[in-house]
Image: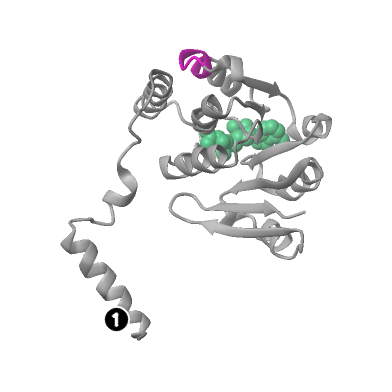
């Protein structure tokens, strides 16, 4: 009944080739907007990339993953550590305009925070976003829970400290997402060694750890 794994993979590849699905097509097409609000956010995301107003921003594949996970979780309270110019924040907003939720995002660089503010206004989502300027290591400690989704994407040395500070605030069933996982081996060890957490790694873009808080 079961063939060898290699034969199965070859067969799947042949079926996909026959169906005309090339690997690149599975990832690269931008989302199709369903509403005017979605269209407006996607247009600003596109402008940010075209005008090079990104700064260490996530690639589109990861942005899509952030949106999909947040919307699936029905998240009302999302926290992002590392706003930059608002690119990943806008992907969160695509989810939040459907869940009716809010994004609190932390950034220590004033110029990037100002650009992010402009992008959120342009996309018409400034009402659903709070930008907290300053050192996130201090400011995150003032957060109140419950938090549905946290995204850690700031100073790599700080990931463990952020994890310790936000974990108690994340509701059971909530998600802790962390970007560039290949750069933070201690963080990966910490999440993999906890019985309270379950993690998978999405590696289509910059490397995203997707961690479920089980209890
Ligand atoms: C990788 S970028 C974030 C990219 C953003 N998430 C995106 O995809 O559009 C990291 C950002 O974290 C900010 N950052 C670094 N250390 C920080 C700290 N201690 N507190 C607040 N922000 C910090 C940096 O200024 C930088 O803008």
Secondary structure mostly taken by the magenta-highlighted segment of the chain: helix
**Where residue 197 sits: x, y (%)?**
71, 58
> What is the residue that sits farthest to the front in this orientation?
1
Residue closer to the observer: 191 or 84: 191
Quadrant where the image shows the C terminus:
bottom right
- Depicted 194 relative to depicted 130: above or below: below
Dot 1 alpha-carbon crowd within 10 angstroms: few under 14, some 14 to 19, many 20 or more:
few
Name which quarter of the figure residue 18 lies in.
Answer: bottom left
Q: Which residues are magenta?
A: 118-124
Residue closer to the observer: 38 or 164: 38
At 65% across and 46% down in the image, what residue appears? 175
Ligand 1 falls in quadrant: top right
**Residue corresponding to mark 1:** 7
- Tell whether 21 sits left or right of 178: left
Q: Is residue 22 visible?
A: yes
Quadrant where the image shows the N terminus:
bottom left
């Amino acid at each position: 009944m079961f063939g060898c794994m290699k034969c199965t993979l070859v067969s799947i590849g042949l079926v996909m080739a026959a169906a005309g699905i090339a690997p690149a097509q599975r990832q690269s097409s931008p989302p199709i907007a369903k509403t005017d609000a979605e269209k407006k956010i996607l247009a600003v995301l596109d402008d940010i990339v075209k005008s090079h107003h990104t700064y260490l921003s996530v690639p589109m594949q990861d942005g899509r993953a952030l949106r999909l996970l947040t919307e699936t979780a029905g998240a009302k309270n999302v926290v992002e550590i590392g706003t930059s110019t608002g690119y990943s924040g806008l992907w969160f907003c695509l989810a939040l305009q459907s869940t009716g939720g809010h994004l609190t995002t932390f950034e220590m660089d004033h110029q990037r925070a100002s650009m992010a503010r402009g992008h959120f206004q342009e996309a018409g989502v400034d009402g659903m976003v709070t930008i907290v300027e300053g050192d996130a290591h201090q400011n995150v400690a003032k957060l109140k829970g419950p938090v549905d989704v946290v995204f850690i994407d700031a100073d790599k040395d700080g990931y463990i400290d952020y994890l310790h500070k936000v974990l108690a605030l994340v509701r059971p069933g909530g998600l802790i997402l962390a970007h560039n996982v290949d750069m933070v081996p201690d963080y990966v060890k910490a999440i993999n060694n906890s019985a309270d957490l379950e993690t998978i790694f999405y590696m289509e873009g910059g490397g995203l750890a997707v961690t479920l808080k089980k209890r």
